[in-house]
Image: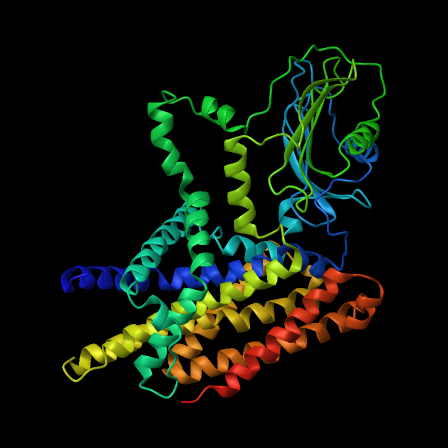
């Protein structure tokens, strides 16, 4: 590669990296915690549930409970289980009954506790785990601005990855083994940036591609809708499999009492290794009622084993089925693979921990890239005014990014201490105001070393207090949760102890 091409790629890599650095750091930091979203939510609610994606609750009792507050005749009722929580998503469409009341013609959405069958709305159910999960794609910013911002950040990150690989291509192996901590500061940051960047390269590439796909796919799909489907968006959704088959509503109530649990039991006998993640009841209570079960086979048996079966409730016959052992279509394979590799939910805790560590490694790669940019411009031929400006920019960057650690740790304590008054607005207010205060404090200090050292130390000290706060507020001490087999609660406490000790050690090793 000649010097001109090298310089073009180098500057493209530098500019694209610097422009997106803060947003990218937020995405990776919050995204790293999002791997444990379900565990954080259960820890916050003092609930422990079986780590399974399979729907196994009493459907009959759930239906009876819902009907006490809402008429379901003629509606489509959907139960969806997204994670390892006690609560499932319940969606109720507007009824198709033309004689129904105005209230019945309104749709509804809520969360249903599968043990006590209590109903919860989205605002009341909001948790720190949900907050961190949504922060990693900037959902707190007004829709769709946050989604598009995170999507384009992932897209430009892909540019930074590709240009970085091309820059180091010839020396990619030799540079990987080079680390000179006692050399010049720029050499140390460059070595760390290159080595850790190569270690996390597959991980970062996957998340750049999948992140861009999930967040800006609407912009990518829009031209296809206009050209191929002549602007018919509904037809596109049908081809993608997002729209279920529509069954005619007969406007006649059935006198038969339906045992929904029986259908689920029969399905479990027929497909013993199948995990049901979605139940759709169409035309509820009508003579043409249908029930559909969707899910996938056990990941240990088949990574991409999508399955679906639909019964006509009146005739009790199967009207459609796609067995999980059958070959999965290309479309379903693509959707499932992109989803699975992004959420890393197919390899248990080991894969999540590895993904978490790679996520934090990516955060360090971002920070080291910013430090290289600063030190490379700290030369004699650079005007003093520009040097001061460059340093101020980096001080602000580091203050914003590194303050996420202590405020995140502190938020875990706050959601326990103020559990009774917890709400979406409370989490928003505390996290963002606290983050702002930490950021302003470190900006005012104007000391990069101080910011690096004390964000790590503060986060560590606060993190070590999280299991103590949990034990005092709830009685769920580590030894109790372990003895009671409440492994999700136990994991979060141990996770914070381990993370805090590691970052405390790193912080103590930092030298000015």
Residue 417 point in image, percent of width and height = 69, 68
Residue 397 makes an appearance in the image? no
Question: Looking at the image, which residue is at 68% across and 66% down?
Answer: 492
Question: Looking at the image, which residue is at 61% across and 51% down?
Answer: 345
* Left or right of 120, for residue 162: left
In the depicted view, which residue is nearer to us: 70 or 393? Answer: 393
- Above or below residue 117? Residue 187 is below
* Left or right of 347, for residue 176: left
Residue 232: image quadrant is: top left
Residue 506 point in image, percent of width and height = 52, 82
In the depicted view, which residue is nearer to us: 262 or 442? Answer: 262
Question: Looking at the image, which residue is at 36% across and 56% down?
Answer: 157
Quarter of the C terminus within the rendering = bottom left
- Above or below residue 452? Residue 143 is above
Residue 465 point in image, percent of width and height = 67, 77
Residue 315 makes an appearance in the image? yes
* Left or right of 112, for residue 211: left
Question: Looking at the image, which residue is at 67% across and 13% down?
Answer: 249
Number of numbered discs visible in the structure rendering: 0
Residue 329: image quadrant is: top right
């Amino acid at each position: 590669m000649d010097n001109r091409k090298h310089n073009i790629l180098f500057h493209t890599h530098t500019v694209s990296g610097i422009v997106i650095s803060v947003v990218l750091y937020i995405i990776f930091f919050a995204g790293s915690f999002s791997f444990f979203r379900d565990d954080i939510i259960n820890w916050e609610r003092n609930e422990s549930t079986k780590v399974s994606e399979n729907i196994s609750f009493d459907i009959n009792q759930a239906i009876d409970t819902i009907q006490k507050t809402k008429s379901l005749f003629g509606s489509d009722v959907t139960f969806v289980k997204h994670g390892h929580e006690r609560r499932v998503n319940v969606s109720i469409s507007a009824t198709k009954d033309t004689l129904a009341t105005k209230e019945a013609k309104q749709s509804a959405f809520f969360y249903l506790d599968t043990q006590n069958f209590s109903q919860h709305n989205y605002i009341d159910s909001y948790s720190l785990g949900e907050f961190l999960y949504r922060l990693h794609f900037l959902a707190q910013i007004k829709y769709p601005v946050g989604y598009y911002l995170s999507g384009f950040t992932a897209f430009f990150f892909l540019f930074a990855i590709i240009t970085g690989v091309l820059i180091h291509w010839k020396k990619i192996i030799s540079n990987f083994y080079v680390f000179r901590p006692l050399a010049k500061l720029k050499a140390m940051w460059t070595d760390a940036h290159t080595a850790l960047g190569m270690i996390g390269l597959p991980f970062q590439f996957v998340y750049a591609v999948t992140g861009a796909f999930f967040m800006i796919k609407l912009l990518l799909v829009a031209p296809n809708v206009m050209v191929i489907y002549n602007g018919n968006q509904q037809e596109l959704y049908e081809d993608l499999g997002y729209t279920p088959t529509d069954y005619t509503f007969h406007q006649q109530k059935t006198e038969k009492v339906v045992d929904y649990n029986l259908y689920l039991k029969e399905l479990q006998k027929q497909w013993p290794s199948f995990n049901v993640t979605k139940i759709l009841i169409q035309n509820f209570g009508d003579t043409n009622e249908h029930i559909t079960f969707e899910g996938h086979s056990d990941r240990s048996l088949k990574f991409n084993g999508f399955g679906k079966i639909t019964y006509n409730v009146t005739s009790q016959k199967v009207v459609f089925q796609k067995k999980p052992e059958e070959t999965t279509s290309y479309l379903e394979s693509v959707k499932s693979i992109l989803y699975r590799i992004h959420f890393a939910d197919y390899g248990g805790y080991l894969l999540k921990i590895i993904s978490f560590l790679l996520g934090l490694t990516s955060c360090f790669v971002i920070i080291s890239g910013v430090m290289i940019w600063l030190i490379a411009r700290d030369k004699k031929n650079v005007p003093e005014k520009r040097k001061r400006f460059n340093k101020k920019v980096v001080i602000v960057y580091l203050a914003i990014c590194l303050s996420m650690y202590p405020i995140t740790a502190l938020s875990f304590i706050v959601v326990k201490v103020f559990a009774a008054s917890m709400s979406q607005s409370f989490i928003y207010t505390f996290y963002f105001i606290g983050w702002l205060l930490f950021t302003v404090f470190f900006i005012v200090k104007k000391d990069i070393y101080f910011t690096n050292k004390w964000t790590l130390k503060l986060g560590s000290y606060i993190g070590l207090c999280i299991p103590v706060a949990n034990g005092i507020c709830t009685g769920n001490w580590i030894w109790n949760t372990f003895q009671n087999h409440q492994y999700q609660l136990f994991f979060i406490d141990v996770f914070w102890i381990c993370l805090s000790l590691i970052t405390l050690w790193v912080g103590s090793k930092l030298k000015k």
